[in-house]
Image (cartoon, rainbow, N blue to C red):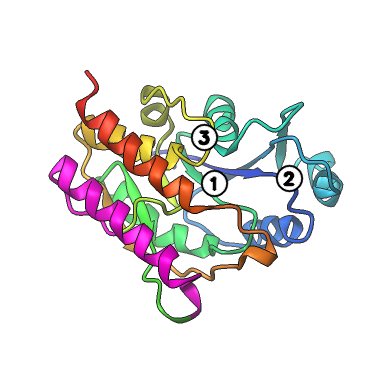
């Protein structure tokens, strides 16, 4: 059988300092399937686009641009609509995640054991951005497990992998970071059992450009509750 192509969506907003390194690392990673690299610029005003312009012109990556900043969720919705691969996943441009971990995440999909795979973080050592950040992530995972009668350890992970057709069937609508909770809720409501694979993670600090705030965690808890009882 022909191997499926994996579309790796990389949404970004003003990531001039890290975007080239993140893309080069992905392009240099050997994976067991062909890869399409799809960047979505969510209205950057710095030199992020210029940093990868040569790769776009050479056809090594694709770039879609929003005229204005609309949020990570909106950027991912654009990527899902534009993806050409049979499988779809996400990689942030901030160098926190290692694309080499996709190799292990692809195994349960390719051998038919799962459709949805999450790369889960252990938050040990330097992977812990702060005590409250980790506690918030654990609280969201526990809340999700309770509401949906599942057992998940990391709902907010960037590394979510599933068939593109399944992503499109979710009908995602959250414009911001709430899309992580919305996607998880809808995967679970669709009857998918999420397969978790441990991944490496190197958290960056607020001064380095981390954009998540406590309000995003509260929003995630509400979205999970809303989706659980939405008809």
Q: Distance between the residues labelled 1 and 3?
A: 9 Å
Helix, strand or loop status at disc 2: loop
Residue named by callout 1: 34
Whether residues under marks 2 and 3 lie with C-beta atoms below 8 angstroms apart, the answer is: no
Residue located beneath label 3 in the image: 85
Q: Name the residue under label 2.
A: 60
Q: Residue 182: image x %, image y %?
A: 37, 35
Q: Could you classify mark 3 by the number of other residues whose Cα lies within 10 Å: few (under 14), some (14-19), or many (20 or more)?
A: many
What residue is shown at x 83% (from left), y 52% (from top)?
51
Q: Is the magenta stretch mostly helix, strand or loop?
A: helix
SS for tag 3?
Answer: loop
Q: Is residue 213 visible?
A: yes
Depth check, front residue: 103 or 126: 126
- Asked if 107 appears above or below 5 in the picture, the reply is below
Quarter where residue 56 is shown: top right
Q: Using the image as rendered, state which of residue 71 and residue 108 is in the foreground.
A: 71
Q: Where is residue 155 in the image (x, y as percent from the top left)?
A: 34, 51
Where is residue 175 drawn, in percent x and y? 53, 30
Q: Which residue lies furthest to the bottom in this view?
A: 125
């Amino acid at each position: 059988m022909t191997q499926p192509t994996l579309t790796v969506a990389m949404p970004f907003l003003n990531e001039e300092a890290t975007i080239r390194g993140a893309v080069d690392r992905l392009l240099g990673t050997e994976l067991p399937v062909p890869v399409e690299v799809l960047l979505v610029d969510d209205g950057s005003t710095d030199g992020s686009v210029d940093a990868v312009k040569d790769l776009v012109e050479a056809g090594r990556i694709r770039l879609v641009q929003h005229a204005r900043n609309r949020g990570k969720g909106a950027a991912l919705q654009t990527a899902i609509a534009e993806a050409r691969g049979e499988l779809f996943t996400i990689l942030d441009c901030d160098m926190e995640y290692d694309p080499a971990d996709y190799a292990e995440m692809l195994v349960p999909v390719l051998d038919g054991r799962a459709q949805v795979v999450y790369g889960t973080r252990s938050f040990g050592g330097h992977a812990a951005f702060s005590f409250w950040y980790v506690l918030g992530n654990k609280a969201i995972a526990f809340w999700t497990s309770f509401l949906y009668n599942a057992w998940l350890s990391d709902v907010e992970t960037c590394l979510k992998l599933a068939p593109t057709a399944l992503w499109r069937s979710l009908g995602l609508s959250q414009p911001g970071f709430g899309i992580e909770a919305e996607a998880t809720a809808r995967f679970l409501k669709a009857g998918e059992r999420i397969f978790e694979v441990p991944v490496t993670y190197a958290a960056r600090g607020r001064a380095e450009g981390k954009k998540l705030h406590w309000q995003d965690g509260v929003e995630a808890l509400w979205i999970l509750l809303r989706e659980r009882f939405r008809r």
